């Protein structure tokens, strides 16, 4: 009688790495499910709203650009205006949205008094948020003093 060999070959070794393929498959299926169901969750009540011109939202500017050139001339956007005309336009803008920011761009050669006049005009018109626009200077490392 023979019982065969006493030595046996070892079977397959257990895996020491995580198999990522099933995890990736499950995640992709979940992404597809979320992509399909997200638009359905956004608006669950269907309405047929009435139409009227009064309900249209106006184009309210969030900021207006006021420019003062070297000669002291003021511009609203690209249009040259005097201080009285500027005050009228800014008052109309403030009536539409009092939180509108005035972005003030002034040439470096403009006297300080002229800038204050333009700022006062904007504040009298009801626009209290004023931002100054400047060009960034290049990073220059300070030289050590001898």
Image: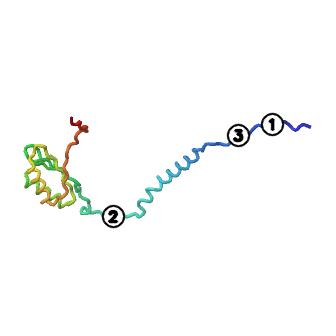
Per the model, the C-alpha gap separating discs 3 and 2 is 68 Å
Q: Quick one: label 1, few (<14), some, or many (20+) residues within 10 Å?
A: few
Which residue matches tag 3? 12
In terms of image quadrants, where is residue 145? top left
Residue 144 at x, y percent in the picture? 23, 36
Q: Is mark 2 on a helix, strand or loop?
A: loop
The quarter of the picture where the C terminus appears is top left
Toward the viewer: 123 or 36?
Answer: 123
> Which mark is nearer the camera, 3 or 2?
3
User: Between disc 3 and disc 2, whose residue precedes?
Assistant: 3
User: Between disc 1 and disc 2, whose residue precedes?
Assistant: 1
> Which mark is nearer the camera, 1 or 3?
1
Residue at point 79% right, 38% down? 8
Q: Is residue 14 left or right of residue 7?
A: left
Q: Is residue 88 left or right of residue 134?
A: left
Image: 8 above or below 98: above
Q: Do the residues labelled 1 and 3 touch (CB within 8 Å)?
A: no
User: Between disc 1 and disc 3, whose residue precedes?
Assistant: 1
Image: 146 above or below 94: above
Q: Do the residues labelled 3 and 2 touch (CB within 8 Å)?
A: no
Q: Is mark 3 on a helix, strand or loop?
A: loop
Which residue matches tag 1? 7
């Amino acid at each position: 009688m023979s019982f065969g060999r006493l030595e046996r070959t070892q079977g397959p070794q257990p895996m020491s790495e995580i198999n990522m393929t099933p995890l990736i498959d499950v995640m992709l299926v979940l992404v597809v499910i979320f992509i399909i169901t997200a638009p359905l969750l956004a608006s669950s009540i269907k309405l047929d709203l009435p139409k009227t011109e009064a309900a249209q939202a106006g184009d309210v500017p969030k900021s207006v650009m006021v420019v003062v050139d070297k000669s002291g001339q003021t511009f609203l956007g690209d249009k040259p205006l005097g201080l009285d005309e500027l005050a009228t336009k800014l008052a109309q803008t403030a009536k539409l949205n009092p939180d509108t920011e005035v972005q003030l761009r002034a040439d470096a050669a403009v006297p300080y008094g002229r800038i204050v006049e333009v700022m006062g005009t904007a504040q009298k018109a009801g626009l209290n948020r004023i931002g100054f626009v400047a060009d960034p200077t290049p990073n220059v490392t300070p030289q050590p003093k001898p």
